């Protein structure tokens, strides 16, 4: 079985790191922090890197090299909680506890600031100054205001035409991206009854999911007969199935999935079960868009299956498996692994552990999936950031397929790390 191999332990932030995001078009990784900065790291892939292989490299294979490219002093007055790249790779959005969202673009020599194409317009050709490594000057081209409290998450839609943001004020906003770095708010949805923790766009359609402290996931779309609205509220209900580790699991996987010394000591303390419904912290769509994963306070991974092709088709909870011994803070789903599988799902949380799951399913009649998808842990690392929580993880999912299998993580200790899926020795 494969393993998670550390590729780089990058120069970290002065305070907790909250979010990481790989650029979808350029060799850049972004991170943000309580220290109010965004750090951009450039990387170089070894010549032997494959852009399409579904197999994992040997642990002895050459590793990508990462370096700190630039630090953006954002000017946000409080913690920068989320970062997100637009699909074209030239535009970065930051969400801050100061209740604002900032939009950043790289100012490059010879590139017109008032490009007619507008936000995320085509960048200079490779070889131009700053074209790849992000070392150009990053300028805040607009600030989006309107939230009444801390902004927790921000995300661009698959085609880059829409931006979503959410906040402690219980709202989800949808912004339309327009020319000249202009954004128009086209929807404000107040369906949640508590702090909204995360937003995530469907990988192909304009369907938006949000996760909240109120223990629910909301699914929203632009109703052809009206405005943006929530078309379904997902209520987690399935009891957690025991974590299944396959008999073929390697010794390294068994060791990393086993309890740490702190977890063993903690078992001596009797903790009453949760009385209130669990906060939903994280969301991730499957690459095919037929499934949505969610994670919360209980530490389990839940999967929701889409039961039709209509924009407002019903989603049904189909899987809930035990995973982490503390809240699950972050999920990331990307293509890879088994040829006929649904990709690789990564999870991370307050127990300091990162787990990579192979997700497989068999399509039944009329597009209904039965039996439910199977989640099988194939790689894990315990204490990925020492004793610190793992706040965020993100796969490298570039459009050109380069760098497949790279996974970044951000910790409560301020550190940013990069891992790769490698074949077990």
Image: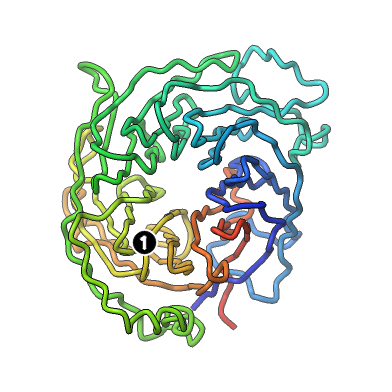
> For numbered disc 1, what is the local secondary structure?
loop
Q: Residue at x 47, y 80 (%)?
A: 253
Nearest the eye: 157 or 68: 68
Residue 217 in the figure: left or right of residue 30: left
Nearest the eye: 138 or 53: 138
User: Which colouring convention does the figure follow?
Assistant: rainbow
Nearest the eye: 425 or 244: 244
- Say how many tags the image has: 1
The x and y percentages for residue 138 are: 71, 30
The x and y percentages for residue 40 are: 69, 44
Using the image, determine if residue 181 lies above or below residue 95: above
The x and y percentages for residue 317 are: 20, 54
How dense is the environment of label 1, judged by Cα within 10 Å: few (below 14), some, or many (20 and up)? many
The x and y percentages for residue 345 are: 42, 60
Residue 239 in the figure: left or right of residue 414: left
Quadrant including the C terminus: bottom right
Residue 424 in the figure: left or right of residue 230: right
Using the image, determine if residue 379 lies above or below residue 235: below
- The quarter of the picture where residue 87 lies is top right
Q: Residue at x 73, y 56 (%)?
A: 66
Label 1: which residue? 327
Using the image, determine if residue 294 lies above or below residue 128: below
Q: Residue at x 75, y 42 (%)?
A: 70
Using the image, determine if residue 137 lies above or below residue 330: above
């Amino acid at each position: 079985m494969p393993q998670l191999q550390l590729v780089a332990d990058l120069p970290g932030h002065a305070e907790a790191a909250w979010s990481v995001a790989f650029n979808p078009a350029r060799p850049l990784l972004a991170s943000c922090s309580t220290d109010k900065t965004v750090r951009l790291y450039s990387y170089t892939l070894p010549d032997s890197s494959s852009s399409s292989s579904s197999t994992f490299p040997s642990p002895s294979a050459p590793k990508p090299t990462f370096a700190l490219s630039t630090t953006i002093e954002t000017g946000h007055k409080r913690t920068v909680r989320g970062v997100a790249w637009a699909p074209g790779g030239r535009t970065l959005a930051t969400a801050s506890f100061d209740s604002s969202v900032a939009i950043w673009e790289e100012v490059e020599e010879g590139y017109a600031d008032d490009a007619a194409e507008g936000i995320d317009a085509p960048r200079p050709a490779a070889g131009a100054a700053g074209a790849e490594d992000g070392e150009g000057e990053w300028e805040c081209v607009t600030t989006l205001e309107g939230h009444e409290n801390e902004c927790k998450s921000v995300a661009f839609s698959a085609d880059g035409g829409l931006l979503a943001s959410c906040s402690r004020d219980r709202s989800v906003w949808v912004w339309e991206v327009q020319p000249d770095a202009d954004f128009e708010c086209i929807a404000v949805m107040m369906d949640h009854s508590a702090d909204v923790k995360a937003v995530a766009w469907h990988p192909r359609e304009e369907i938006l999911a949000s996760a909240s402290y109120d223990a629910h996931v909301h699914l929203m779309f632009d109703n052809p007969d009206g405005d943006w609205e929530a078309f379904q509220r997902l209520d987690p209900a399935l009891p957690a199935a025991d974590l299944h580790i396959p008999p073929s699991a390697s010794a390294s996987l068994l060791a990393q999935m086993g309890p740490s010394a702190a977890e063993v000591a903690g078992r001596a303390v009797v903790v009453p079960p949760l009385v209130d419904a669990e906060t939903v912290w994280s969301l991730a769509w499957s690459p095919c868009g037929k499934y949505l994963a969610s994670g919360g306070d209980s530490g389990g991974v839940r999967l929701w299956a889409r039961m039709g092709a209509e924009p407002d088709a019903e989603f049904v909870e189909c899987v809930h498996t035990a995973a982490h011994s503390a809240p699950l803070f972050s999920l990331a789903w990307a293509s890879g692994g088994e040829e006929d599988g649904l990709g690789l799902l990564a999870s991370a949380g307050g127990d300091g552990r990162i787990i990579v799951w192979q997700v497989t399913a068999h399509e039944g009649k009329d597009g209904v999936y039965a039996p439910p998808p199977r989640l099988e842990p194939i790689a894990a690392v315990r204490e990925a950031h020492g004793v610190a929580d793992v706040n965020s993880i993100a796969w490298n999912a570039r459009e050109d397929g380069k760098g497949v299998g790279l996974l970044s993580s951000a910790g409560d200790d301020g550190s940013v790390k990069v891992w790769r899926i490698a074949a077990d020795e």
